[in-house]
Image: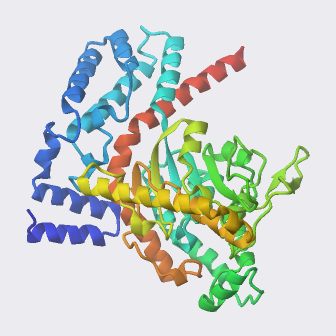
Amino acid sequence: MFTSTTRKLEKAMEAANSYEEWRDAAIRHDKAQGLDRWKAMDLSRRYDFVSIRTRLDRLRVMRARHDDQGLLFTLNEGIHGNMGGMGSAKLYAKAKYGTKQLVVDYVDEIVAALEHLADDKTDSISFEEKLDFFRRAHHCFGCSAFMLSGSGTLLYFHVGVMKTLLEHDLLPNVLSGSSGGSIVSSIVSCYPKEALLEKFSLENLIDTNNLADSNNTAAPTSMLGSLLQGVMPQQLPAEKSREMITQLLPDLTFQEAFELTGRHLNVSVAPVEAHQTSRLLNAYTSPNVFIREAVFASSAIPGIYPPVTLAAKNDHGERQTYLPSRQWVDGSVSDDLPAKRLARLYGVNHYIVSQTNPHVIPFIADNKRDGSPLSQIKYAGMKTARTWLNTSAEVMRKPLSYSQTLSRVSNIALSVLNQDYVGDINILPSTRLFNPVKLLAKRSEKDIRELVLMGERATWPKLEMIRVQTLIGRTLDRILKDYEDRVLQKTGQE
């Protein structure tokens, strides 16, 4: 039941200028709506509350009795992030702030049990047995990744999202980005934490943006670029885009960046040539590739900016071309959100997405498809339309092959069509339709401030969901790192 009070509180949330302001209004809104009682009650059809309550009580009893072997056995039965459906987005859609207290209590108890077992005072279990358990638990539980979509100059929305996650220590160590998203994720992966707040300060972003304030009259690189220059007189030339990226990013390889910050950076790039596959560049697959060149490539929008040849550091520490016969462009056209590849490389099974791809955001919701009849019909319709378009393209493949340009455009269109653009937690702009004239244009100081704040405001309602759903994984990361560091120290002493 909505009253004038709840409407005022909703307006206060929309106008909040800090997380504290938003959270205060959200908590008061839930109380006014009687949702405190909903959160306190176990009962709900949205999850298996009986199984979770039974397991929670069992863990509490064993920890209280110091039954360490029993606790280890129970945890070995499985630590699940979605036990009984407790990871469902539906559980976070009812209230403005938080979810069922039972879910929070269960996650907190799992964390307390893990920390209890990890403690050196718990000596009834050997160090070797604990290490084996934490390695298996970490592998089976999986981890979270933060994926940033292509964006054009909407990348400032990503900045607001990233700042908020950093400020609350909720940013996963596995990051991916394409196009504008690759710029933001690379900044985070190339600088130590203490330097990031300065890099993401509005003053620094505005100064960097001013690099584009130039009277550069260089000829556009393509026919489409010529057309866009007439529509967008402030379109960033390729040289200025590269200058901005150079100003923002140090000249590090993927391996060097990982050693500096411990973050697993992944940048999507798409091939220009036909019959070649997209690449996900990172410290595993391409450790010696320079991140700057990867970002240049991932930001090279086909038909507007020229394709890029990558560069790498050789065994003499010298720069040389990487795959000299290959050129690369905007990664979002083929692998905007590389979920499957991240799962294979890092064991990721939980995805947080900041999505600003302008051709996508009008058509997606902030939660994955639910089970309502309308949602099922919508999903079936989209799947059918996608199948027909793919079939039509296959039928037309031979006629299109006579024109290299048409064939390339068709391949790009199909690649865009067949991607999945959502994750488990989706952070989307409040404005779904953006002026296409401004997507590649230089942003004013006012635009930058508004986009950053929009990103922050879009993230605040998701913070509690992110905190609860990633807490077990973050705890396992911390414990396992500590244990393996101790193993290395012991090995070094021997």
Q: Residue at x 60, y 45 (%)?
A: 263
Quarter where residue 412 is shown: bottom right
**How far across and how far down the image is residue 127, in percent?**
52, 13
Identify the residue at the far top of this view.
124
**How far across and how far down the image is residue 119, in percent?**
43, 20
Between 43 and 358, the one nearer to me in the picture: 358
- How many numbered discs sit on the rendered protein? 0
The answer to whether 113 is drawn above or below residue 126 in the figure is below
Quarter where residue 113 is shown: top left
Between 146 and 223, the one nearer to me in the picture: 223
Q: Residue at x 37, y 41 (%)?
A: 469
The answer to whether 92 is drawn above or below residue 150 in the figure is above
Q: Determine if residue 199 is in view.
A: no
Q: Residue at x 54, y 53 (%)?
A: 337
The answer to whether 448 is drawn above or below residue 326 in the figure is below
**How far across and how far down the image is residue 25, in percent?**
22, 63
Q: Determine if residue 116 is in view.
A: yes
In the displayed structure, does residue 491 sit left or right of residue 475? right
**How far across and how far down the image is residue 152, in percent?**
57, 71
In the displayed structure, does residue 91 sit left or right of residue 151? left
Identify the residue at the far right of this view.
316
Image quadrant where one finds the N terminus? bottom left
Quarter where residue 245 is shown: bottom right
